[in-house]
Image (spheres, helix red, strand yellow):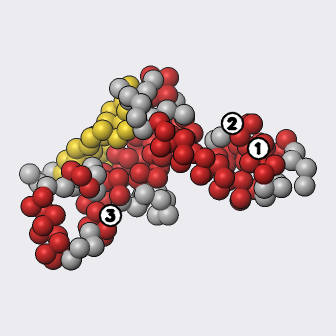
Amino acid sequence: MPVTAEMIKELRQLSGAGVMECKKALEATDGDLKRAQEILREKGLTMAAKKTERVARQGLIESYVHQSRIGALVELNCETDFVARTPDFKELAHALAMQVVGAQPQYLKPEDVPAAVLEEQKRVCGDDLSKFYGEACLLKQLSIKDQTKTVQDLITEAIAKTGENIVLRRFARFELGIE
C-alpha cells in the first residue's frame, strides 16, 4: 500500500514523531497505522534510554491545589528552557502534580524507600513488592489520566516526543490537618 501524506500526517498527530520517522514506520508496515505506532513507540523507548544520561537542569515547578484543602508541588526538569515553555511539557507537569494529589505517593521511586519500610513490607506481603511500589512510588503508579500507563511511561513518551531528557526530580504533597 502506498504511503500518503494524509497517513503520515495522521501518524504524526498520534505519535508526535517527525515526518520522516512517520514515513519510514508506515513504509515498514505497508501503511498499517497501529503497527507503525508500535514501531515509533519502540524507537522512542530506545531514544529515551539513550537520553537519560544527559543533564536536565532546566524545567519548571508546577502546583496543583484541589478544593483549597490538598495541594502538590512537583519539580520537572528538562535540558533546555525552550522545552520547559512548551504546552506539552507544562501539561505533563500539571498532570504529575494532579497525580501527587490524587494518588498520594510516599516516594518518588523504589530506590527511595527506606530499608526498614521494605523489610516491613516483605514481612507483610512476601518478596513480591510490585503492588507496594505501584501504590507508594510515584514513578511506578498507574496514571490517573490513563490507567494503561505508569507515570514513568508518561515521562518516557515525553522524552521521545521532545528529544530531551526529562526528569521528575521531586514532589511535595500538602493536606490540611495532616502533619
- Drawn side of residue 107 relative to residue 116, left or right: right
Q: Going from the N terminus, do you reach mark 2 or mark 3 first?
A: 2
- Residue sitting farthest toward the top: 81
- Between circles 1 and 2, the one closer to the viewer is 1
Residue 90 spot, x, y in % from top left: 45, 36
> Which SS class for mark 2?
loop
3D distance between C-alphas at marks 2 and 3: 33 Å
Quarter of the rendering occupied by the N terminus = bottom right
- The spot of residue 37 in percent (x, y) is 67, 53
Give 95 or 16, whichever is nearer the viewer: 16
Q: On the picture, is 164 further left or further right than 177?
A: right
Q: Position of residue 34 (x, y in %)?
A: 71, 59
Left of 163 or right of it: where is 106?
A: left
Q: Residue at x 72, y 53 (%)?
A: 36
The type of residue carrying mark 2 is: Gly
Task: Say which label, 1 or 2, has the lower sequence index.
Answer: 2
Report which residue position mark 2 lands on.
Answer: 18
**Which residue is at 22% across, 44% downward?**
172
Say whether residue 141 is visible: yes
Per the image, the residue denoted by label 1 is 24
- Kindly indicate the quadrant of the structure image that contains residue 78: top left
Give the residue pinned by disc 3: 134
Please say if 90 is above or below 43.
above
Name which residue lies at 26% across and 43% down: 171
